[in-house]
Amino acid sequence: MDIRFDNQVAIVTGAASGIGLACAELLAISGAKVALVDIQSDSLEEATKRVQGKGVAQGYQLDVTDIPAIAPTVSRIRQELGEVDILVCSAGIGIHKPAEQVTEAEWDTVLSINTKGLFFCNQEVAVQSMIPRKAGAIVNMASMFGLVAGLLERTTYCVSKGGVVQLTRTEAIEWAPHNIRVNAIAPTYVLTSMTMNALKDREFKACVLDNIPLRRLATVEDVAAATCFLASSAAKMITGVILPVDGGWTAR
């Protein structure tokens, strides 16, 4: 199956690195005009140049926790690239800390980025571009730890991703009459800079691999491929689905 996104516009948040960048690259290679959105200006500039080497792309700096800034950013993307067909919300953060030590500020930071910012990005793209045209595909980045309890010291992350899971399901139902499909990816541990430090601990890495029946970590390309499938017309009858890309972890 050759998945193509010719003449479509895609927004990817958290696109300066990791999963977001891999999604942006694959979308561009597949013909989409890609708006890379991220808070990190330097990394975003480098990522945009990289994606431009593979297709049409433009970078937009945005802090997804700055809710009033989301609407003008989406409006600018629409003016410069066109109406939005695909939204991939990949911006995220994790704090590894025992539950009894988590501060209110840390709680707010994780939930603001992973859940609140994601919701308002979904809302703004839907209101501005998808609902009026009665068309669109949204793919949110959840986690297998939004479906099952995580390993130690992941409380805030698990709660935030559990929120993404339920947010995705409820949006899928609410926006189905507008022909907007909303799905989510639930990856296992992925080989990114965000996880590499934790995985340097051999005992911890062994514990992780023991829980993955396929006995390997996911790559950003694994996640990007699943994301592009859900965003494509090949998945036109799929909505409200949380797709694990976890090597079988949640099947246990």
Image (tube, grey):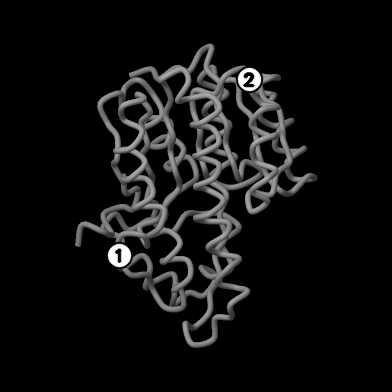
**Front residue (pair 1, 45):** 45
Q: For this view, does 20 lie left or right of residue 61?
A: left
Q: How many C-alpha atoms fall within 10 Å of the one at disc 1: few (<14), some, or many (≥20)?
A: few
Disc 1: which residue:
148
Q: Is residue 239 left or right of residue 222?
A: left
In the rendering, at what x and y percent does residue 94 appear?
A: 54, 65
The residue sitting at the top extreme is: 7
Q: Position of residue 118 (x, y in %)?
A: 52, 48
- Is residue 41 placed above or below 228 in the rendered structure? below
Residue plotted at (64% across, 22% down): 78
Say what amino acid the circle numbered 1 marks. Val
Residue drawn at (37%, 70%) of the image: 150
Q: Is residue 88 above or below residue 7?
A: below
Does residue 156 appear to the left or right of 11 in the view shown?
A: left
Work out whether residue 78 or residue 97 is closer to the camera in this orientation and state it.
78
Q: Secondary structure at mark 1?
A: loop
Report crowding for label 2: few under 14, some 14 to 19, many 20 or more residues within 10 A (C-alpha).
Answer: some
Q: Amino acid at mark 2?
A: Gly
Comparing 121 with 36, the one in front is 121
Q: Position of residue 1 (x, y in %)?
A: 33, 19
109 in relation to 47, above or below? below
In the rendering, at what x and y percent does residue 73 appear? Answer: 69, 34
Which quadrant holds residue 213? Answer: bottom left
Would you identify the image quadrant in which residue 170 lies? top left
* Residue occupied by mark 2: 55
Q: Secondary structure at mark 2?
A: loop
Q: Residue drawn 58% across and 47% down? A: 18
Q: Residue at 36% across / 60% down in the picture?
A: 146
